[in-house]
Image (cartoon, grey):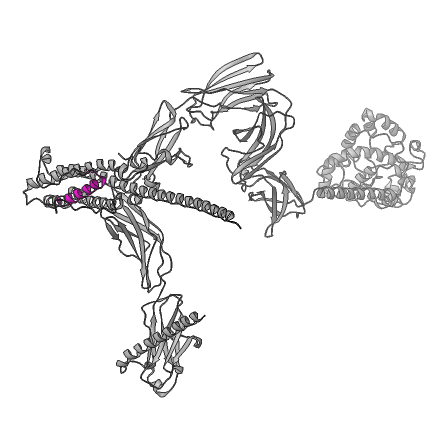
Amino acid sequence: MKLLFSSGAVVMMSSMVLQLFGLAFVASVLHAKHEFSTHLVTSPHVPVVEIGTNFTATCVIVNTVEVTADSLYWNLSESSVVPEKNYIKINESALAVTILISGEESEWLFCSCKKNSPYVSLNKSKFIHGIYLKKAYPPRRVENLSCVAEQDGKLVSGFLNCKWDAVGGQTEDVKTQYTVMVQHESGTYRSTPTLLNKTMVDLGFFPHFMHFDVWVVADNLLGTVESEHLKQDANEFVKTDPPSKVTAFPEELFPNCLLIKWEHPIEDVRIKLTYQIRYCQSGSHTWSYIPLGDTDKVITSFRLQNLQPNSAYVIQMRCRNREGNSGPWSNWSANETKTTPEDRPRSKPDLWQLSGGDHGEEVQIICKDPKHANGRITSFGLILYNKNGPLEQEIIPADQNQNSSESRVTVLKKISLADKQFVRVCVNANNSKGTSPEACLILVRSSEKTTVEKLKVWTQEGQMFVEWKRPNNTAVSEYVVEWARHGKTDWQRENKTTTRTAIKGSLEKFVRYNVSVYVIQSGRVWKLVHKEAYLEQGAPEQGPTINKSYPAYDNAHLVWDEIPLDKRRGFITNYNISYRKENEAPKSIRVAANNTSYTLTELLGNTKYEVWISASTVAGSKNSNPHSFTTLRYAPGTIEGIVVGVSLGFLFFVLMALLLCFLKKDVLKENFWPQIPNPGESTIGNWSPDYPPKEETPKENCVSGVSVLDVGVCEVKLGFEEDKTSLSLKKGKYLSEEHSSGIGGSSCMSSPRQSVSDSDEGPDLADSTASTVQYSSVVASSGYKGQTPSSHSQHSIFSRSESTQPLLDSEEHPDVSLQEGCRQVQPPPRPSLFTGAENQNSMESDDFRLLGVEQHDFCPLREDTELTTGPDSLSADTESGAVSSYMPQLGGYRPQ
Amino acid sequence: MNGHVKNMHFQQLVERGATLLCFLLLVVVDSTKTVAAARNQECSNDLHRTMKLTRLVHKDTGDLIKQYKTSQGEMPELLCKASVSGIPDPNISGLEPSEKIASMYAQLQAFSPHLTRVYEQQTDLQPPKSPLLNLLNMVINQTGMLTRRINNFYHKVFPNLPLPEPAGGSTTLPPPQNVFQQKVYGCVVLTTYKKLLTNMSKNMRTLRSKVCRKAPASEFNLF
């Protein structure tokens, strides 16, 4: 304890002594120039301070008693005052401070006075003094020093290039510089100091076989430090050029070998080299390296072995100092590519079959070149066997347009199994050097299928994997995994223990493959399961095509085509039908992927819709082109309903009208066909102006109750029948002439000439009074019995028709018309024609009304001769009529 | 305790001490062997590198002679075999390895001024960037390295034997010569120097089994 105490006291005392000595030194130095100096003096003024260390400075008051140490303070760069806890008051005129050097930028440490006396204020510049703190990191030894002397022509360059990793920081004001030192028996060489982490040392001539000692000196204002020394033979720093003239030579006798020859890049006397050889098959980037032990001799040739015949190999070499197997490797030499000689095929061709036909009876034999074809396969030998022995043998030339390779598929033959139970197919491959072993396959026409269950296909990291379950109770020789796309089939074989594999062929993205697994049992191919799969799915390349739309009133049926298989780029998961009216947001409907039609419902009639369908896969979707349709104006059946309704309504109306007519026929009859008094019942019927009542013989043939007028009626009737015919002939004339019949002479006693005076035929007709038409109804108010106006004119009252109906032709030409009419028309026998009003024909009444002729007017008179010369057909009636009811007005009618 | 027991204890103590002493002796012997092996390995490596350097200088001297002959124009081959006074003897003297190594060192030292003189003469005769000058410079540089390496090797192998100074004192250089004499002189110096290097190589091969014992055979499988 005593010893420790004493040592601590010694340290404290020594530090105090040093401080006092420093102060005394500063004071003495500054005292000499106090006239020009300030009243504050700081110390020490070191060139650099180390970052991360404590720095102690002292401020001394000189040549003034104005201020004391209590009035002093320290600040850094005039901005931050150093806390007083860092101050150490040495005495009344000296104040020390200790600060931690931090930050990389250099700065000032000022000692100032905080007293505000007039003197201090006036001499402010004398009460401030500072120390410039130039900061630096201490140099640290560099790491990972490496030096290389590169080959220059036939010699090694005398410049040794070195590089290293700098350690530690540097500040802007104080940089660390590096110098590479090289020492060997002939002397020491040094590089030009550099601030970088690489440089070169000029050695003059490269000192082969000398022992080098290389290190790096890092130095700055804070000191110097050396790196670890590299102590190696000079040749271990040499990086030569790669071996020159590297050449490979194929040797016909050794199809598995290539002989490589090269030259030393530098004379062996300067540096002995070891070589490294690497090679790979052309196109592959997986290098195989020859063990270094095989090439560490003084050799300039090497034979690569165990190569594939007829394969191109790329060879590279490099070298380095052989002594100690250390030193930098040269760069790799340029590629030397050579192909090994051909050899006979060493493995079987990969034989396979493609089934075709409805029941698999058509089989196509295909095969790939042997895995170890060892040359260009020129042909395949095919032999077919059945149970009786060889069927046929055939040499099939290989497709020379394709390069011979393991992936080349050659179609050998198509076999029909329709008439064969089984066929055994054996194939060998030939190249220029020989024949391969034979591969056989047994093709069975039909058999029970062994099923590989639960086939699972998935993709992972750009590869397609297949997993299946081993079939039960089946001795499997091997499996064949087949994958097929449109027009292209490939396969690979897996051993019997495999139940999961990756497809090794090159699969394309967005292409649908049909992956199948077959079982091979003792050469026989058994069926399988298959599954469709994509290596990678993408959005469809094109959308579905809307084929047709069938719009109705409130729905529309859409039919679209599936996307072509090569455009689908994935499994369609669903369709999405979007439709919209004009200027409205679209609506969407999701439809399952197995549909190719859909009926949109709840549409508005007579509305134009735009519709499009997007097909989706797991990777995206693609829209079809928009399709437009317009819904119908009417719903189906609307028009039919209207037509049926209207028809039914009309029918109902008609029926109702008929019913009404039927029920109200009396009213209708009364209104439309009013009851006309029967002239027969008229008292006028008893009027007979010329004939006495004794001539009542015809009365028997008339209806009872009709006396004299019966004759007239009968005559009228007959005349009417005749007039009808003549009326039809002259009707138009009468209608056009619109002659009033006049009343003059219309009476049987009046002259008819006056009523038809404007007729063209008047004069002719006027000659005969017999043909004068009796057009007026003459109603005698008192028993008219004859036309004897001479005797009874003053007693008779004539009631005349006021009809303006023109005269009928028959009436105008009674002589002609009556004759013709009586000849041509045979009125049907109507024995009771005038027996009652109900027997009157309505049509006849209409015609009469149309003619303005009273039905019961007078008939034209007929001569007896005329009546007798009438048509035979009429003779019966007319004779009977003439006999019974017709009474010629021989005596009763006279011209007036 | 009686004296018999005391004697037994003493006897056991002696036996243990003897065993310990034997063990220590074995350790010392083994370490000595290890040190010797390490020293021999280092010797072999040094000698190996020296031999390689000698061979390199020999090769470069041969190239130099070819270049020299090419550079001097038409010069009969016999002139290079002429006897020129003052040129060091290319033979290695001495019987012991140390003497042989010392002789090699002395001869190399003796040739160095002559080579420098030839360089000076050819500097006047050849263009500045003549490959001959470059080769000469390189051989002179390599000769200096070889000389220092042999010196170091000698002191490593024979640390207690001082390296004798050349018997004839400092090397005597020829007086000023005409161009022809310079050509002949240079060729003779280079040819003789090559002979020296040949002799050195031969002698070094004999030294390997004498100076560096138990050196790995592979290390000397150089020629």
* Image coords of residue A493 (percent x, y): 53, 28
Residue A67 magenta-highlighted: no
Quadrant in the rendering for residue A818: top right
**Extreme residue in the bottom direction:** A118
Q: Eyeballing the image, is A219 above or below B220?
A: below
Quadrant in the rendering for residue A74: bottom left
In magenta, the rendered stretch is B93-114
Quadrant of the image containing the N terminus of chain A: bottom left
Near-viewer residue (A55 or A861) = A55
- Is residue A243 toward the left or the right of residue A419 in the image? left
Near-viewer residue (B223 or B116) = B223
Determine if residue A327 is in view.
no
**Extreme residue in the top direction:** A388
Determine if residue A91 is in view.
yes
* Image coords of residue A523 (percent x, y): 57, 21
Residue B111 magenta-highlighted: yes
- Say how many tags the image has: 0
* Image coords of residue A222 (percent x, y): 33, 64
Near-viewer residue (A387 or B124) = B124
Q: Eyeballing the image, is A784 above or below A121?
A: above
Residue at 60% x, 52% y: name it.
A585
Q: Eyeballing the image, is A89 above or below A473?
A: below
- Is residue A800 toward the left or the right of residue A262 in the image? right
